[in-house]
Image (spheres, rainbow, N blue to C red):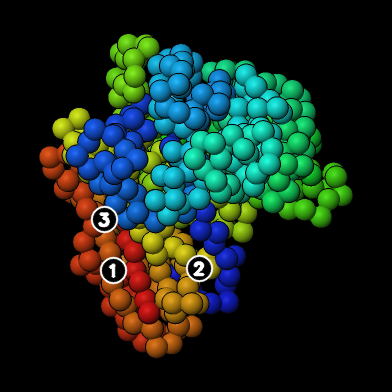
Amino acid sequence: KQAKMVIDKEYRISDIDDRIYGSFIEHLGRAVYGGIYEPRHPEADEQGFRKDVLELVKGLNVPIVRYPGGNMVSAYNWEDGVGPKDRRPNRLELAWRVIETNEFGTNEFADWAKKAGSEVMMAVNLGTRGIDAARNLLEYCNHPGGTYWSDLRKQHGYDQPHNIKTWCLGNEMDGPWQVGQKTPEEYGRLAKETAKAMRLVDPEIELVSCGSSNSSMPTFPEWEATTLDHTYQEADYVSLHQYFGNRDNDSQNYLANTMELDRFINTVISICDYIKAKKRSRKKMMLSFDEWNVWYHSNNQDKEIEPWTVAPPQLEDVYNFEDALLVGSILITFLKHADRVKMACMAQLVNVIAPIMTDNMGATWKQTIYYPYMHASVFGRGTSLHPVVSSPKFDTKDFTDVPYLDSAVVYSEEQEEVTIFALNRHIKEDLKLDINVSGFEGYRIQEHIVLENSDLKTVNTSLHQPVKPHTNGKSELRDGYVEAVLGKASWNVIRLK
Ligand code: AHR
């Protein structure tokens, strides 16, 4: 099979907002307790943060991390998680039916994020609470001092405000599983009024209005149209969430799932622009894809978990090689939509549907999905270029005309570097790829990184991590063309400088 591509500096989609390489830490399973925070671990620092985990997080260069939920935020009292630790209450955490000790809360997370080199994306509870709790939390976090909540923060040992810029107005409020689920009218009104109050506290913040929980929700896309009608002026972003799984064990179909992701993004953009037109607004609503990943391997095992324990192992998907390929394709999709998708969070970061794992023997390791995420985050900064592609195509159970080649191109003017991310979706055959790079005179191939494996189901575990990238990719530069061979089912990163 043979594909062709033309790339040029002039074919610009948009500057890339680094925050598309964000992630997510929820108070869920072993993400916080036994993940990023484990005071009794030999690698814990003076605040109880695991340094070995922090190192792996830094390797991903994560620009922003969403916190504290997820479903958990919809019944969370943020006040439980601040102040002297010995006075913090144990609570029934209703979303995941566990005990929350509140040993870790807002201030600890702000400190942890600083150490990880990340910004915080904070979510407020619009399930059981509303305007008052949200504006108080914002005052606690961002107001310099001289008021009740900002002085309380100072009393808690934080003289300087955290200055958290990005705030989510609730989480998945259309979901029947959500504590305090809302109709679109109820949510739209509450989100708008909460946003208004929050902006009065701190006009510098950015706000995310809740979109549908996923594209298969019965209320999608009416939810977006109704809620944005209320929140359009106050919000800066609308959220999208989507998880994938290869439940039918049909790998060729599985790797085509980003066709649906692309449709989902385009539909949400259309709704935003419809509301823009309806309101005669000049403002362009941006997209925050603040939960995405593969999530299905652990579904059955989670049904066995006893309720009301502390930090049980929930949502611990063990990812295989084909999951890493789909993750690469998802990141490619965001790059292709860099003009509208300005934030995105891989859900989640540690232990819970995560690229980074720890075990109860104290080890850490990288799951298969760590690598495409790392490559995109490290090399995918700058301007997203539109690659003009011709590729052979295939049909599957759910999709037609799926190109075997899935690709995105990033140009860093500053570093004078071009990175081509290319996925060969064909699970049985190599793909020859000719890339016309004549617009990049003087550039040479720096490296061709490849993630490949003869078995799509290979996994990384604490003992053995066979899925890892190598730099022996086959590509040569000849007469203004990069001639590459993309192995069957492979993720490729071709870097020119
Ligand atoms: O990331 C796991 C869960 O998925 C989140 O808590 C929720 O928002 C979504 O349904």
Using the image, tell me which numbered label, if any, was put on residue 448: 1
Residue designated by label 2: 382
Q: Nearer the viewer, residue 428 or 61?
A: 61
Q: Position of residue 148 (x, y in %)?
A: 67, 33
Q: Position of residue 127 (x, y in %)?
A: 62, 22
Q: Earlier in the sequence, mark 2 or mark 1?
A: 2
Residue at 43%, 87% in the rendered image: 441
User: Which quadrant holds the C terminus?
Assistant: bottom left
Q: Nearer the viewer, residue 193 or 439?
A: 193
Residue at 65%, 27% in the rendered image: 133
Residue at 70%, 21% in the rendered image: 183
On the picture, is 146 further left or further right than 485?
right
Query: Which secondary structure lies at badge 2?
Result: loop
Q: Cα distance, mark 2 to mark 1?
A: 19 Å
User: Which quadrant holds the N terminus?
Assistant: bottom left
- Name the amino acid, label 2: Gly
The quarter of the displayed image where residue 361 is located: top left
Using the image, tell me which numbered label, if any, was put on residue 451: 3
Mark 1: few, some, or many residues within 10 Å (few <14, many ≥20)?
many
Residue at 63%, 39% in the rendered image: 150
Residue that protrudes farthest toward the left in the picture = 463
- Name the amino acid, label 3: Leu
- Name the amino acid, label 1: His
**Circle 2 or circle 3, nearest the eye:** 2
Using the image, tell me which numbered label, if any, was put on residue 54: none
Q: Position of residue 432 (x, y in %)?
A: 31, 66
